Amino acid sequence: MTSSKVLPLLLLLLLPSAALAASISATPLILTKSSREITIKWTRIESPSDLDWLGIYSPSNSPDDHFIGYRFLNGSDTWHTGSGSISIPLVNTRSDYQFRIFRWTRDEVNYRHHDHDHNPLPGTRHRLAGSTTVRFENAEGPDQVHLAFTDRVDEMRVMFVTGKRSDAGVEYGLDPSLVGRRVVATTVTRYERSDMCDSPANSSLGWRDPGFIHDGVMTGLDPGKRLVVMLLAGVRSTALYLPTQ
């Protein structure tokens, strides 16, 4: 082996292990209605700083400066080691998510660029790592279920959201098999970006499609008995067991 070949090999062997790129992972990759919390783990953050931060993005192809939320890595007890984890709940926006880690230095802090709590927004100049995408299972299906009383003791209002306009209804009864069930149709409404009063809610950055809002009233209920409810929107959703009083 000639000396000209030995020198590059020696330089490669002498490279410090800290040159390895930072790594970030998100689990689980598919969220369900019963499991909406995700855990973000990271390793190999070189010379960790208390200003290192995690950006939350949806959809996943959003530009770096279009994050919809953020957390500082020092929320993890082990952040100073360059590794750590944070768990956060997610909302089904019917778009996928991605998580990115950035380095923010004190000389880059801009107090004129702040969030709604008047804290300076972190900078996105130095991206360290990005995760794989995360999504919700059956993201277009019924979600965001809300219940309310009407002015009658034998009625209850059900409201939920879907990702697509479709004929939807509420199926309900006293038996878990829904024998002798009743079905009520729902009205469908939605609002558009033009209905928002101001930015960023009516801008491309702040706007999130709300989907379609379904509203139905269950009638003829028996007070004091458990009610089984199924949401009908393309496919049945998970049953809800509701005490009526």
Image: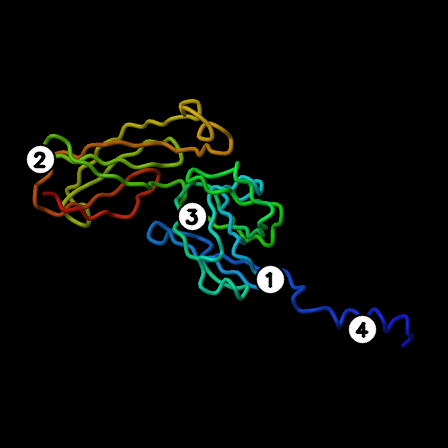
Residue 160 in the image: state x and y as whole percent.
Answer: 30, 37
Mark 1–mark 4 distance (CA, rounded to whole Å): 26 Å
Q: Nearer the viewer, mark 3 or mark 4?
A: 4
Residue 49, placed above or below residue 242: below
Check the picture and name the quadrant holding the N terminus. Answer: bottom right
Residue 58 in the image: state x and y as whole percent.
Answer: 49, 42
Mark 2–mark 3 distance (CA, rounded to whole Å): 36 Å
Q: Which residue is mark 3?
A: 136
Q: Which residue is mark 1?
A: 47
Mark 3–mark 1 distance (CA, rounded to whole Å): 35 Å
Q: Are marks 1 and 4 in contact (CB under 8 Å)?
A: no
Q: Is 11 placed left or right of 140 in the picture?
A: right
Residue 89 in the image: state x and y as whole percent.
Answer: 38, 51
Q: Nearer the viewer, mark 1 or mark 2?
A: 1
Q: Which mark is residue 10?
A: 4
Viewer-side residue, 102 vs 193: 102
**Mark earlier in primary sequence (3, 4):** 4
Mark 2–mark 4 distance (CA, rounded to whole Å): 83 Å
Callout 2 amino acid: Val
**Mark earlier in primary sequence (2, 4):** 4
Looking at the rendered structure, the secondary structure element under dot 2 is loop
Residue 194, placed above or below residue 94: above
Residue 158, placed above or below residue 194: below
Q: Which residue is mark 2?
A: 153
